[in-house]
Amino acid sequence: MAAPEAQFATRYAQQLLQDLGLRLALNAGPQLHPAHAWAESGNMALTGEPDGPGQMCPGPLASYADGILAALAALAPGAPLSSLRGGRILSERAALSGYRRSGEIAPGGSCRLLRAQDGWLAVNLARTSDWELVPAWLEAGPLAKWPEIAAAVRDRAVAPCVERGRLLGLPVAALEPGGRTTDHWFEELVSPARPDGSHTRPPLVVDLSALWAGPLCTHLLQLMGARVIKVESRARPDGMRAAAHGFYDLLNARKESVALDFTDGVALGELRRLIARADIVIEASRPRALQQLGIRAEEVLAEQPQLTWVAISGYGRRGPGAEWVAFGDDGAVAGGLSQVMLECTGRAMFCGDAIADPLTGMHAALAAWASYRRGGGRLLSLALRGVIAYGVHFARHGSCEDMRSRCARWTELVPAAGAPLPPPRAITAAARPSGADTQAVLRELGAVRRS
């Protein structure tokens, strides 16, 4: 048993590459056992009750992250990835922000697990608008504090709470018995209509994303040699810019910054022309967000047959889930991760810090570069919920009792005190101010409309 477990990183990387239609030799190097990888990454320090020990995750998530870096290195030999530790990428935001484990409260504080009449649900009130929707969601008077919300949820059934919350645009998810699993971590919604070609020059990436998953994806693409142009709305720049902990700089330094007024027809024309020069587009919003601007990925790909378009969302681009909102903490719950922890420990808890975000960003980088390397022509959809569910499924080991045994056995392999949260990578440069490169980039790439 020990030898296969110690190879989780390689096995996972090989499976992801196979899913993408690639067979490459991996140089994963010496691998930590998943238990040691989880503890060393700092994620054990972020999981569990605040007054108790850090908790083991029986799903080898840190090993998965190590495996993805190995796969990226195989796709881009010579890229400066060897200094990165996949598992530690998952905990960098927490290390910079001073987050700690809080059991039923996510380390970031905005998401909580609430006990309902017939189970548990995750509620993420990360935005002011989310708090404003709470009275309508619970059909109650003003509810301005978490204890009031918890009391209102306690006598309600999970399913209608989740359904109504999603209809209102709230990030909510249920812990479901057995966890919802999937055999796919991405969907290929548009495929090349011709045999795959190949690209060897560094790609031009247009990054329309914000916060964590998308910017991490393009950060990794940049380390692999891509030129990344970050595009923001002048009215609503990336919300991570306002954070004081430097995480925005870590992910966005050395990207060129373009800011546009998305309410202006001329600016939207410039955005379309900028996309027309891209090899890879990364976006992380519900499909209707860009559609409201008149930009439809399927139509763009019909005009640009070598483009790779990667769409990151909470629940994918098809079906009712296309309109549901999710962030990293509740997305991980939706994927079954907190349910696994409940089954193994008897306690509902979050696992790491918004862990669906960095894991999805890393998967997205792999999918994007693989598609570009094969000639593009693809619309790839990755969902926070889907990536976590895939990982839960990949590592599922027999029955709930089998998973509890694995969790106990892995816990015995690490010191009782666990491991502290490791320091993040050094921040060596500041991100460009919003819009600092707008005119230079648009002129160079021919995106400025000539009078």
Image: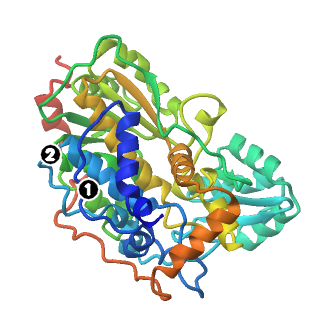
Q: Mark 2: which secondary structure?
A: loop
Residue 274 visible here: yes
Mark 1–mark 2 distance (CA, rounded to whole Å): 13 Å
- Expressed as whole percent of the image width and height from the top left, the position of residue 269 reads 31, 22
Image: 405 above or below 82: below
Image: 375 above or below 324: above
- Expressed as whole percent of the image width and height from the top left, the position of residue 218 reads 29, 45
Snapshot colouring: rainbow
Image: 300 above or below 230: above
Q: Dot 2: few (<14), some (14–19), or many (≥20) neighbours within 10 Å?
A: few
- Residue occupied by mark 1: 28
- Residue occupied by mark 2: 77
Identify the residue at horizontal 23%, vertical 30% (top origin). Answer: 373
Identity, as a three-letter code, of the amino acid under mark 1: Ala
Closer to the camera, 332 or 247?
A: 332
Identity, as a three-letter code, of the amino acid under mark 2: Pro
Closer to the camera, 8 or 194?
A: 8
Closer to the camera, 137 or 79?
A: 79
Q: Dot 1: few (<14), some (14–19), or many (≥20) neighbours within 10 Å?
A: some
Identify the residue at horizontal 27%, vertical 26% (top origin). Answer: 270
Identify the residue at horizontal 42%, vertical 59% (top origin). Answer: 4
Whichever of callouts 1 and 2 sits on the residue coming sooner in the sequence is: 1
Q: Mark 1: which secondary structure?
A: loop
Residue 430 occupies which quadrant of the picture? bottom left
- Expressed as whole percent of the image width and height from the top left, the position of residue 299 reads 40, 15
Q: Is residue 196 left or right of 420 when viewed as pictured?
A: left
Image: 365 above or below 446: below
Instruction: Specify the quadrant that holds the C terminus.
Output: top left
